[in-house]
Image: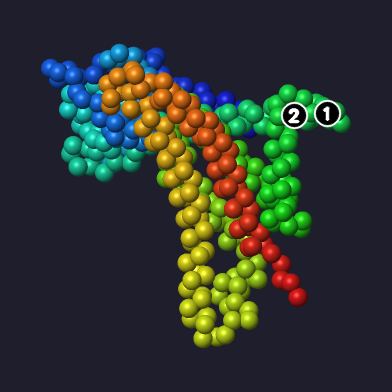
Amino acid sequence: MKNISIRLFVLFLFLSALATPSVRAEEPHKHGEEEKFNAGEMIMHHVADEHQWHFATIGHTHVTLPLPIIIYDTNKGLKIFSSSHFYHSADGTHEGYKMEHEHISALDGAKLYDFSITKNVASLIISFILLLTIFFTVAKSYKSRSGKSPKGLQSALEPIIVFIRDEVAKNNIGEKHYRRFVPYLLTLFFFIWINNLLGLIPGGANLTGNIAVTLTLALITFFVVNFNGKGTYWGHIFAMPGVPKWLLIIMTPVEIVGVFMKPFSLMVRLFANITAGHIILLSFLSMIFIFESLAVSPAVAIFSTFINLIELLVAALQAYIFTVLTASYIGAAVEEHHH
């Protein structure tokens, strides 16, 4: 596994180096007069995915890292080049391809399959490497310090791991089945939590605020729950015991809808809460530019700091809520019939 993580990291560096040898600054287009600040456009730009990594704006210079464009053209085959060709082009085109609103299309109408490394994909790779590094370090610590008190990173993470195991998995799934679901629940919690925290770093990607990511997490939970569903679970959905036959005509469709609404609620809750947090924080920061005065900056700084502290709490809270709801859904699916 260590070799796999190292190879993925080297691959990511190679692809980034292919795009550009270093972080570079690019000048905005000149329009004769300075454009008026658009708060909505700025906020949506920061919460959306893109084909470059924007770190900071210094004066009129945008410090960005262009990411690799990897597309398969049904007419021309595989194409790999830097996204900077699109961003530096006056009309957003390069070698017969055009990027408009971060969507790449072929000028000749050919069908494209886009495998590009976007900002969210790059952040996902980084979080993957970070998670592997953290837990291989903790596992190594447990092996080398067997029988001894925890120390360092092992000591910091052990209370969280024990809490997820005992208070979330065991309490919601039950003594008989909880052990085989603990690895999934731990992975889920730490993946969401770490990516929530990475999204709060200035210039970080809004990975858990991307609905495609939350959809994937919800779908995994959906399959885990329903593939492990016992006869009792399916019996309560299609033929609830103690319910009159005529009432099943109404209740059964409601229960079937509920099966799909559970992962849907997981998807929307995480996406909406994380995205809303970023939008609120960026809205406060935008007030300085909207009022065009530094007089509001002390109030903005206070409110922004307060919101940022709340976001640190929300980062852990949303990871916990997603994990505990997943555990409760699994618990309902694997529950044995009680006489």
Where residue 21 appears, x then y in whole percent? Answer: 39, 14
**Three-letter amino acid code at disc 1?**
Ser
Q: Give the residue at x 71% y 48%.
A: 167
Q: How far apart in space, not on screen, are marks 2 and 1 (Cα)?
A: 8 Å
Q: Secondary structure at mark 2?
A: helix
Where residue 44 appears, x then y in whole percent? Answer: 33, 35
Q: Give the residue at x 63% y 27%.
A: 133
Q: Is residue 256 above or below residue 13?
A: below
Q: Residue 320 vs residue 86: left or right?
A: right
Q: Is residue 279 above or below residue 241?
A: above
**Three-letter amino acid code at disc 2?**
Ser
The crowd level at tag 2 (other Cα within 10 Å; few <14, some 14-19, many 20+) is few
Ranked by sequence position, the earlier of labels 2 and 1 is 1
Q: Nearer the viewer, residue 102 or 97?
A: 102
Where residue 33 appears, x then y in whole percent? Answer: 14, 18
**Whether residue 329 can be seen here:** yes
How many badges with numbers are in the image? 2
Residue assigned mark 1: 149
Where residue 59 appears, x then y in whole percent? Answer: 30, 13
Q: Secondary structure at mark 1?
A: loop
Query: Which label sits on residue 155?
Result: 2
Q: Residue furthest right?
A: 147
